[in-house]
Image (cartoon, helix red, strand yellow):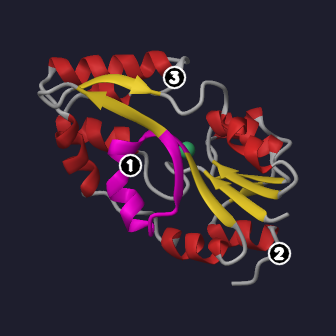
Amino acid sequence: MYNVACIDLEGVLVPEMWPHIAAATGLSELNLTTREVSDYARLVEVRIRLLREHGIRLTDLQTLVETLEPMAGACAFVERLQQSYRLVLVSDAFLEMVLPLWHKLGEPELQCHHFECDAAGYIVQPHYVRRGGKQEALLPFQGCRTLAVGDAFNDLSMLRAASQGFLFRPSAETRAAATDLPVAYDYLDVLQGVGLTV
Ligand SMILES: [Mg+2]
């Protein structure tokens, strides 16, 4: 038996990427989230279509994401957790977009989706690492002591399935949907919540 920490990426360790991309490209439609388009796969289809219509290739997205940095304290949080946990980033983002931030976080174990591109470099097809909710990420770790941290609706199944789950700086809507879960307002809250000293 060992300890496993399943940590969401965007909104917990790094900023949300799509608002940044929307601002940098001037395409406000890229600000759509699962609040407006509740089906995530449908939302991804919309984003892929918009990118193609506006001539934005995967390398252009990567260049924009390169300018983002992990949140203050995120790298130290990852390092501290890794002293006691096998740490897995469980993200609904796409590998090719996440890579610049993943390098900055010290390249922890990562579970996320990936994009397929055409010869011209345009994204044509998403490939999903899981079809169900994020709780699937915990399935290989039955019998382990598990910690999960996430900030949004797509994290709730994982947070509830873990031995300990923390909502990290949730929106009021997410908080209202999950009053059963403890809230962490910073990384120290999580570390103290699992009994780790800093
Ligand atoms: Mg998130």
The residue labelled by disc 1 is: 98
Instruction: Count residues near mark 3 (Cα–Cα under 10 Å), then give few for <14, some for 14-19, many for 20+.
Output: some
User: For numbered disc 2, what is the local secondary structure?
Assistant: loop
Closer to us: mark 1 or mark 2? 1
Compare marks 1 and 2 and give the one earlier in the sequence: 1
Closer to us: mark 1 or mark 3? 1
Q: Residue 175 appears at what percent x and percent y?
A: 72, 40
Q: Residue at the location (28% across, 50% down)?
A: 65
User: For numbered disc 1, what is the local secondary structure?
Assistant: helix
Q: Is mark 2 within 8 Å of ligand 1?
A: no
The residue labelled by disc 3 is: 40
Label 1 and label 2: CA atoms lie apart by 30 Å
Rendered-image quarter of ligand 1: top right
Q: Amino acid at mark 2?
A: Gly
Quadrant (top left/top right/bottom left/bottom right) for the N terminus: bottom right
Does residue 5 appear left or right of residue 104 in this picture? Answer: right
Q: Residue at the location (17% across, 41% down)?
A: 60
Compare marks 2 and 3 and give the one earlier in the sequence: 3
Q: Is residue 84 visible?
A: yes
User: For numbered disc 3, what is the local secondary structure?
Assistant: helix
Q: Amino acid at mark 1?
A: Val
Label 2 and label 3: CA atoms lie apart by 35 Å
Q: Residue 38 appears at what percent x and percent y?
A: 55, 18
Instruction: Count residues near mark 2 (Cα–Cα under 10 Å), then give few for <14, some for 14-19, many for 20+.
Output: few
Q: Nearer the viewer, residue 138 or 197?
A: 138
Q: Amino acid at mark 3?
A: Tyr
Q: Which mark is residue 195?
A: 2
Residue 97 sits inside the magenta stretch: yes
Give the residues in magenta.
Answer: 91-112
